[in-house]
Amino acid sequence: MKVSAIQEFRKSLRTIERSVVEQLKLQTRCCGVTLAQCHTLVEIGDAGTINLVKLAQRMGLDTSTLSRTVDAMVKEGLITRATDSVSRRAIVLALTKKGAKRLAAINGSCNEFYGRMLDSIPEGKRPLLIDGVRLVADILSAKLNHDEKKLLCSCSKDIKNG
């Protein structure tokens, strides 16, 4: 593949990343949660109930980092934390009514924003875009999960050598 095409793809991904992060910050701020809390609400909402270890794996975080977010959310009444009935060492998380209401507000806001964005794309091209974004997400997710313990940056030896 041509380097120019790769560079253009990377440039587009950076633009998407910045725009999505900025939009999420705005939407979560207006819904009264942090970005980390937003992601946690969405993942727990998708799962219904989930144990802390699986949630951390799903989010690509270590459990101690996620525990701090969970602690704050339990205090705020957004999620419940209970001991798993099957494995007493596992912690199971679920949304409270307040958490479900907050998630509904976030989903409504995001759906409205992205719905308007998709409406600006010709109807016949929407499925292609959605499939393309899903494919990129799946590839990136699989690559990061497969290589998570490997150094993904090949320039580190060049930096050391001057």
Image: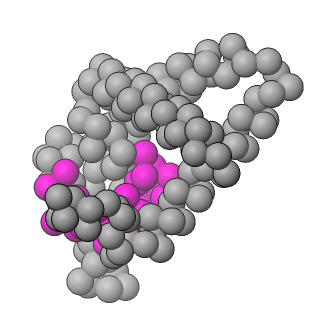
Q: Quadrant of residue 61?
A: bottom left
Q: Residue furthest right?
A: 124
Residue 16, position as x, y percentages in the image:
48, 31
Judge left or right: residue 63 versus residue 18.
left
Q: Is residue 62 magenta?
A: yes
Q: Is residue 109 left or right of residue 68?
A: right
Query: Looking at the image, which is closer to me, 16 or 118?
Result: 16
Secondary structure mainly formed by the magenta segment: helix
> In the picture, residue 28 is in which quadrant?
top left
Count of labels in the image: 0
Residue at the spot 55% in from the left edge and 19% down from the top edge: 112
Here the colouring is one colour
**Res. 52 in view:** no
Q: Quadrant of the C terminus?
A: bottom left
Residue 44 pos. (x, y %):
41, 54
In depth, the one of 19 and 30 nearer the eye is 19
What span is colored magenta in the figure? 41-69
Q: Position of residue 135 (x, y in %)?
A: 66, 51
Residue 19 in picture, x, y percent from top left: 42, 25
Place residue 129 in its image quadrant.
Answer: top right
Residue farthest along the front direction in this orientation: 162
Q: Residue at x 64, y 46 (%)?
A: 2
Is residue 54 a member of the stretch shown in magenta? yes
In screen coordinates, is 84 left or right of 139?
left
Question: What's the residue at 52%, 39% (across, down)?
Answer: 7
| Residue at left offset 47%, top offset 22% | 109
Q: Nearer the viewer, residue 111 or 149?
A: 149
Q: Is residue 119 above or below residue 33?
A: above
